[in-house]
Image (spheres, helix red, strand yellow):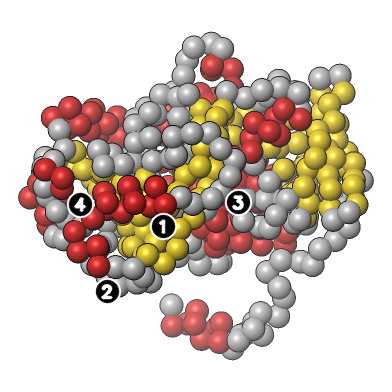
């Protein structure tokens, strides 16, 4: 580390980088081998793996806003793999492994911090569910165990063990639970992709999908007042909460409903909470950032909506539950509140892979866990684009599972049940 710091201090990039992380904007070309719709974490991750590991660089990432400004910027940056199904655990465990090495992969600090996640059980039925979940996690690569109240007190001394007269009876302790800087992840992938020739076009909104003979041939996009028709061999849809709207432009429907998901953060205080603590019974989770702020999150709003506004009703409910878990936080001031858009499927698992339109690939249905899947999603979607074959890891998440009645049920796997 001292040598690395000295080397950096003597380089041309200190104190200011000689070359910008992202290249200046360029004109859209008439044709690309691959067009990726959505410049969030998933979109730029797919472009990065295509360029670095498959040598496919004639790629355009089209983002209607700015890099990582959608759901990538509107989450609570939680990383974990303690899911309910074997398919889910295997998929997210691979994502955790990739996250751990991303800073080295990018040569760019994503502020990865492994802190563990503690999920509280307040009833006997919750304990039985956690015991089953522990077995699935242990067998398929998740680092999870069931712990007792005394162990919980040692992990989180400040936790109220009898919140709302619902005693904490046990906990699901996920050692691999972590956080990372969400915008750093997006910038790291974008920097690596654009350095290899990928084009990132911000403020470029896709307005239509051109399908001829059942195959995607182009996308129509608006950039300022100019409209473009961009030919492509393959198109990848990665637009989070707007997945259904874009799919309709391609001529098919997705079994997805979009709900707002709100979170908020307090003023910074002295560090006291290392693990991420969640209670599905109270629909609340709490974590402390490296800057000392407390982040509160909970369940999604109970009605479909595409508006990313915050509400007083959710604020009051969520903070009341947070105060039950940690009573002294009632004295803190709330700094800000924000909302993302979650594209929820009926089984709470994503839709990845093929679509009814040839060469039009889907990256959708992430609900509340899109950020934590960013690396493995980018890797597997890039493999699909490069080879035309659906990777084994994401085969269970195909859109055809809904018509074949083989859903991957992850209901209840979230940190705060919806």
How packed mark 2 is, by other alpha carbons closer than 10 Å (few <14, some 14-19, many 20 or more), is few
Quadrant location of the C terminus? top left
Q: CA distance from mark 2 to mark 4?
A: 20 Å
Q: CA distance from mark 2 to mark 1?
A: 18 Å
Q: Residue at x 19, y 64 (%)?
A: 328
Q: CA distance from mark 4 to mark 3?
A: 31 Å
Counting residues from the N terminus, which is met first, the one under dot 1 or under dot 3?
3
Q: Residue at x 23, y 55 (%)?
A: 323
Left or right: residue 277 compared with residue 348: left
Counting residues from the N terminus, which is met first, the one under dot 4 or under dot 3?
3
The residue carrying mark 1 is 264
Percent x, y of residue 215: 81, 24
The residue carrying mark 4 is 324
Picture disc at residue 270 = 2
Query: Which residue is more in the foreground, 376 or 316?
Result: 316
Q: CA distance from mark 1 to mark 3?
A: 16 Å
Query: In the picture shown, does residue 65 fall above or below 376?
Result: below
Counting residues from the N terminus, which is met first, the one under dot 3 or under dot 2?
3
Query: In the picture shown, does residue 130 fall above or below 64?
Result: above
Secondary structure beneath dot 3 equals loop
- The answer to whether the residue labelled 2 contacts the one labelled 4, judged by CB atoms less than 8 Å apart, is no
Percent x, y of residue 365: 55, 33
**Residue 8: which quarter of the image?**
bottom right
Q: CA distance from mark 4 to mark 1?
A: 17 Å
**Residue 268: which quarter of the image?**
bottom left
The residue carrying mark 3 is 70
Task: Please count the marks in the image.
Answer: 4
């Amino acid at each position: 580390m001292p040598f690395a710091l000295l080397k950096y201090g003597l380089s041309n990039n200190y104190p200011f980088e000689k070359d910008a992380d992202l290249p200046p904007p360029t004109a859209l070309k008439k044709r690309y081998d691959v067009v990726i719709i959505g410049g969030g974490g998933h979109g730029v991750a797919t472009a990065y793996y295509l360029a670095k590991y498959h040598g496919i660089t004639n790629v355009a990432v089209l983002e209607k806003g700015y890099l990582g400004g959608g759901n990538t910027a509107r989450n609570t940056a939680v990383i974990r793999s303690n899911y309910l199904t074997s398919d889910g655990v295997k998929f997210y465990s691979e994502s955790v492994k990739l996250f751990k090495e991303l800073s080295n992969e990018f040569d760019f600090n994503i502020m990865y911090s492994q802190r563990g996640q503690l999920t509280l059980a307040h009833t006997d039925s919750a304990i039985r569910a956690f015991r089953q979940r522990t077995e699935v996690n242990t067998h398929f690569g998740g680092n999870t165990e069931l712990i007792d109240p005394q162990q919980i007190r040692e992990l989180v001394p400040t936790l109220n063990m009898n919140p709302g007269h619902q005693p904490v009876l046990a906990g699901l302790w996920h050692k691999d639970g972590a956080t990372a800087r969400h915008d750093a992840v997006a910038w790291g992938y974008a920097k690596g992709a654009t350095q290899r020739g990928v084009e990132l076009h911000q403020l470029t909104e896709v307005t239509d999908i051109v399908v001829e003979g059942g195959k995607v041939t182009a996308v129509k996009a608006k950039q300022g007042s100019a409209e473009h028709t961009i030919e492509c061999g393959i198109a990848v849809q990665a637009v989070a909460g707007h997945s259904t709207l874009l799919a309709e432009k391609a001529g098919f429907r997705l079994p997805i409903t979009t709900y707002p998901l709100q979170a908020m953060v307090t003023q910074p205080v002295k560090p006291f909470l290392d693990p991420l603590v969640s209670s599905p019974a109270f629909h609340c989770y709490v974590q402390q950032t490296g800057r000392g702020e407390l982040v509160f999150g909970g369940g999604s709003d109970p009605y479909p909506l595409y508006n990313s506004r915050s509400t007083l009703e959710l604020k009051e409910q969520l903070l009341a539950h947070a105060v039950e878990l940690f009573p002294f936080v009632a004295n803190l001031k709330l700094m800000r509140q924000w909302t993302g858009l979650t594209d929820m499927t009926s089984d709470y698992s994503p839709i990845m892979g093929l679509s009814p339109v040839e060469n039009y690939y889907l990256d959708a249905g992430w609900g509340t866990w899109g950020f934590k899947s960013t690396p493995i999603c980018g890797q597997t979607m890039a493999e699909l684009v490069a080879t035309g074959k659906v990777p084994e890891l994401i085969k269970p998440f195909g859109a055809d599972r809904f018509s074949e009645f083989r859903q991957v049920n992850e209901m209840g796997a979230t940190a705060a049940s919806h």
